Amino acid sequence: MLNPFLTDCESQTMTKLPKITCLDDVRTILGDLPGPDEQAAKAAQEREPQLTKPQGSLGRLEELAAWTATWQGRYPARMKTPNAHVFAGNHGVVAQGVSAFPPDVTKQMVKNFEHGGAAINQMCNVFGVGLCVESLDLDHPTVDFSIAPAMGDEECAEAIAFGMDVIDSASDMACLGEMGIGNTTAASAICLALYGGHSMTWAGPGTGINTEQMAHKADVIARAVSLHKPIMKDGLDVMRCLGGREMAAILGAVIGARLKQVPVMLDGFVSTASAAPLAALNKHNLDHCQVGHVSLEPGHILLLEKLGKVALLDQQMRLGEATGAVLAMGLVKAAVACHNDMATFAEAGVSDKDADA
């Protein structure tokens, strides 16, 4: 039986996107991204103190409600049609023995998503989130980046353009996740290239490798970053040399969401690492993004610190599949509902703190 929340994954948006044929086209787009909607932000700020509760008593939910309206570009915010996108890709670096599972598992899991059998299907059902499974050439892994750049310029740009296009402007929020054997290795390599440090700091267990295998994984990462360092001039070069197609597509989805006024909920380590090259280009490029949860992958905590992001949840998860992002939808829906539907002091006939005694 197919998951009833598995949606038509082709974008229904009418938003016209710029044509992308190379990474320089992406750089041009990034030079002129739209900013926050200040009118929506102001409206949220004005209503919040009037609601029947002590000011600040809903903590981060208050900030989350205002942030949602600000990046949806409308007030009040709406949370009726959030969508999850699970991008799937295979990585040539798996040939170096960095994963506990073979690349075929990526295709097998995609079929599981499509038939409603994975964790993400159950979470989407519970929280009313549409699910789109976005596969990127699973029969042809990227080049082993320990030997040569993972992708060519045009190939990386094509994956970014794909991610930009799948975001629907009618979506209230885009939850971005991934499936790809070997992609924690790619995520760790991207982080090492962007932020430095030691490869062992960024490398984690991924699909469940042991300590000896992790040391090998860290060595592969360190050698790859050193190999490509001379040609990695910015974050997009880092993605091209070390990322995967699904990761480049996530990066593209973040850009597409910004252009279409769709707030983004990133999932765990791989999704956040996929977006990180954008922050390396401009620290405000991820202002429209929240992080759903902090992963057990050790590099994620450090990456969040580098990005100045605080995850909404910590459930000791590390599955991927956008599960942490969709789980956070419960918080976003609650935040928006409280802000929009709570009575004000005046409406409820309740005295506020400034009323006469």
Image: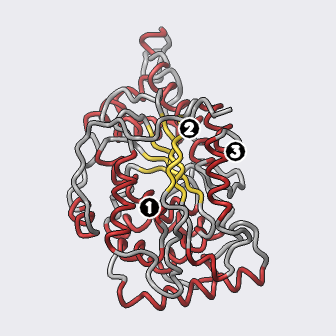
Q: Name the residue under label 3.
A: 119
Q: Which of marks 1 and 2 is nearer the N terminus?
A: 1
Point out the frontmost of discs 3 and 1. 3
In the image, taking residue 251 as reference, residue 144 lies left or right, namely: right
Q: Quadrant of residue 296?
A: bottom right
Give whichever of discs 2 and 3 has the lower sequence position. 3
Q: Relative to residue 238, is residue 135 drawn left or right?
A: right
Q: What residue type is disc 3 on?
A: Ala
- Judging depth in this view, the residue of 45 and 87 nearest the camera is 87
The residue carrying mark 1 is 275
Residue 26 appears in view: yes
**Disc 2 residue type?**
Met
Measured in 3D between alpha carbons, the distance from the residue under mark 1 to the one under mark 2, in whole angstroms, is 19 Å
The residue lying toward the viewer, choosing from 171 and 117, is: 117
Q: Distance between the residues labelled 3 and 1?
A: 23 Å
- Please name the residue that numbered disc 2 is placed on: 329
In this rendering, does residue 56 appear at all?
no
Q: Quadrant of the N terminus?
A: top right
Looking at the picture, which amino acid does disc 1 mark? Ala
Number of other residues with Cα within 10 Å of mark 1, as a class: few under 14, some 14 to 19, many 20 or more: many
Badge 2 marks a residue whose secondary structure is helix
Per the image, label 3 sits on a secondary structure element best described as: helix
Q: In this view, does 157 lie to the left or right of 61?
A: left
Q: Nearer the viewer, residue 94 or 295?
A: 94
